[in-house]
Image (tube, grey):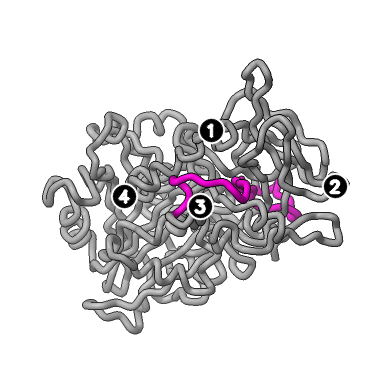
Amino acid sequence: MSSLKKRYSFASNSLHPSHHAELADAMDEFHLDDEIYDDDEHFEVDVESPTPPPPPASKNKSSMFSFLSSGSSKAAPPSPTHHKSSSGLIWHAQVVSNSFSNVKVCDSNGKLKSRRPLPIVRADDFFGSLVHQNNGQYVFPRQLNDWPGLKNLTLVSITSKMKNSMGQVKIKRWWNEGDATPPSFPTSSKKSIECVRVTLVSEPHTRVGYSKASRGHLWWLKYDVDDFCKSHPKVRLVHGKEAALKISSSEHKITKCHHFSHRYAKPRGESTKDRLVYHSAILLEWSHGLFCTVAEFAWLGGVGGYGGQVNWCIDKNTDEPELLRELNLPQNQEMIFPWVANALGEIRVTDVNVANVEAFQLDFLKKYSVEEQGPDQRFIDATVCQTCHDVKLMNRSEVDFVNYLYNYIRSDERYSELQNVRNCQTFASDLFRLLGNHYSHPVSSICQVNYKNKESSFLYQPSDEAIYN
């Protein structure tokens, strides 16, 4: 354990765009000219006020997303007690002119590429699709840039970067919600405008879950215990508390839990930072003895926004992973939206086709390790840090487990790499403390400094639960 204390783990980056060259380029593609950008001031807009607050002094280059809250200028979400039932998640997108063309974001026919990390849409497509509501709001009802999880979005503002005669870059605000004139693509007599940024707010349920039918940003790729086939187990993806409870059993109990960590293999080689970044998760063994389960905390939308790839599925690198097929089912498509980097998190639960921790180490941690199989693998320095061979927690069934995870994610949905609020390591430590009744702390020495265990968050329902019942 002494060697583990020096390991730094701030994010579950198996789904990070740096693992794919095209997605990595996409994150910087909007530095094309003065009007194409993704790093301008990301100040929030209070939809109850037509006049936006002034932008903060510092820039936030990492987030295309923020939480809509009254009187707040921070991108992190407020505590659940401050949730407003009238607002959901905020997204930013680029609206480009009808004549805009760029090889990075357009195909050979000049059509905009689908599902960009920063959504992009033509002016006619966007403004021509807006629907004026009776309450005065303008709603984009279609899928934005072909993202199934981005639809029925309410327009909040239209802005762009402009340069004055001195070469200084300023933010020009063309339209705000509440303005008397309808929103439209702006024109300028001095210089043609190629792109503007629109701020949109999604439906209220998005602040507490992927869909209206099931609350909680958590999902479970689950095997059917009653119809389990070792050679080819059938899986089913469910998201949110209500959906997960419908297929969970009160009979199957958690018997053992294991706290493990690993570093991510990088096909193009590790940087100095990569050699310090570790991910932590929990492996569960069940009373049925058929398979195990991995529980982890990571960026919201990471799986839906990155093609359904997860390290605990054998078919991860196939053209159509089983998780992707499940995501594309109608009941799960609302989970498909751009990942939210280092702002909000989701709890991911994946059943793994191994009977115990020994098989997990052999069939996953070693089988897909760089040390054992070469550089084109998934893990580096994978280690089981702590083990509880006999879970004594009284309420430890699948149903109990789902309720624990729902309470935890609803108590605080933030994900922070550096502020030690919540990340993969703090979640793993909290869950191991609850299940194993053992002392546990984050693997990273930096996370250890400000870590405050929050295993009690698993036990109590959210204070604002009545709002959504």
Q: Give the range drawn in magenta.
A: 80-107
For marks 1 and 2, give the CA distance: 29 Å
Are the residues at dot 3 and dot 2 in contact (C-beta closer than 8 Å)?
no
Q: Position of residue 349 (x, y in %)?
A: 41, 61
Q: Do the residues labelled 1 and 2 touch (CB within 8 Å)?
A: no
From the viewer's perspective, is the residue at label 3 or at label 1 nearer? 1
* Magenta stretch: helix, strand or loop mostly: loop
Q: Which residue is drawn at 58% across and 50% down?
A: 411
Q: Splitting the image into 4 quarters, where does residue 325 fall?
A: bottom left
Q: Residue 152 carries which label?
A: none
> What number is the disc on residue 259?
4
Label 3 close to label 1 by CB (< 8 Å) = no
User: Which residue is drawn at the image coordinates 23% and 45% (left, top)?
Assistant: 267
Residue lying at the far bottom of the rendered structure: 227
Q: Mark 1 points at which residue?
A: 33
Mark 4 or mark 1: whose residue is earlier in sequence = 1
Give the mark toward the camera: 1 or 2: 1
Along the horizontal axis of the image, is 160 left or right of 420?
right
Calculate the distance from the C-alpha at mark 3 to the C-alpha at mark 1.
Answer: 23 Å
> For residue 338, which numbered disc appears in the image?
3
